[in-house]
Amino acid sequence: MMIALACDHGGFELMGGVKPHLEYKGFEYKDFGTYSTDSCDYPEFAVRAANSISCGECDRGIFICGTGAGMSIAANKVAGIRAALCSDCYTAEMSRRHNNANVIALGARVIGSGLALEIIGVFLGSEFENEGRHGRRVAMLDELDAFRSKELGVRERGLRGVWSEE
Ligand code: RB5
């Protein structure tokens, strides 16, 4: 499983503790920044990392900002992303089992690093219950994505190029 990492200045310090934890647990990751505590704009990093999941380069994401709110809002604007803002293990588990969340957003100013690592462990270790009502509901989310992408005309290029030529 390849994990996309994204943070802003508010999440940088916590992300510094997440990376060695992932390595210790044997997970691979790609770090999409930011890379310092200098003030930056969370949508830029969220969308870069979210695109890597949307196009299949990465499988899941761990996105961190001060509250987790900005990161989750930005991530959920990318087609194919189901980002869950979690401050507890129960929500993290259910976001996988019921919502097939592929991104977890965490608030570094909300939860401590110990709880954050617990939540991440639950998120990475839980599987989607892909049958019946949960499968149907996530399929509805996919339909919303498809409808919106067509409406905006961005299905082919995702959100790449909104702020840069990349
Ligand atoms: C940065 O000060 C802060 O606004 C950001 O990290 C995040 O909490 C936004 O949702």
Image (cartoon, grey):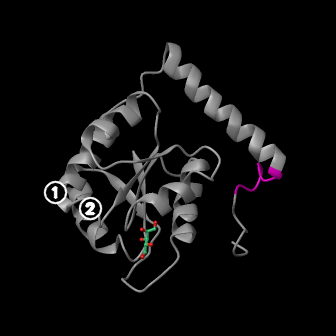
Which one is in front, 86 or 80?
Answer: 86
Q: Does 49 sit above or below residue 151?
A: below
Q: Which of label 1 and label 2 is nearer to you?
A: 1
Residue that extends furthest to the top in the rendered view of this protein: 132
Residue 60 percent across, percent down from the top left: 44, 47
Residue 73 lies in the magenta-colored region: no
Q: Which residue, given by chain and number where applicable, does mark 1 sit on? A: 114
Q: Quadrant of the N terminus?
A: top left
The residue under label 2 is which amino acid type? Val
Counting residues from the start of the chain, the first of labels 1 and 2 encountered is: 2
The residue under label 1 is which amino acid type? Gly
- Locate residue 164: give its quadrant: bottom right
Q: Does the residue labelled 1 lie within 8 Å of ligand 1?
A: no
Which one is in front, 156 or 86?
Answer: 86
Secondary structure predominantly adopted by residues drawn in magenta: loop
Q: What stretch is highlighted in magenta?
A: 152-158
Q: Which residue, given by chain and number where applicable, does mark 2 sit on? A: 18
Q: Quadrant of the C terminus?
A: bottom right
Graded by Cα atoms within 10 Å as few (under 14), some (14 to 19) or many (20 or more), the crowding at tag 1 reads few
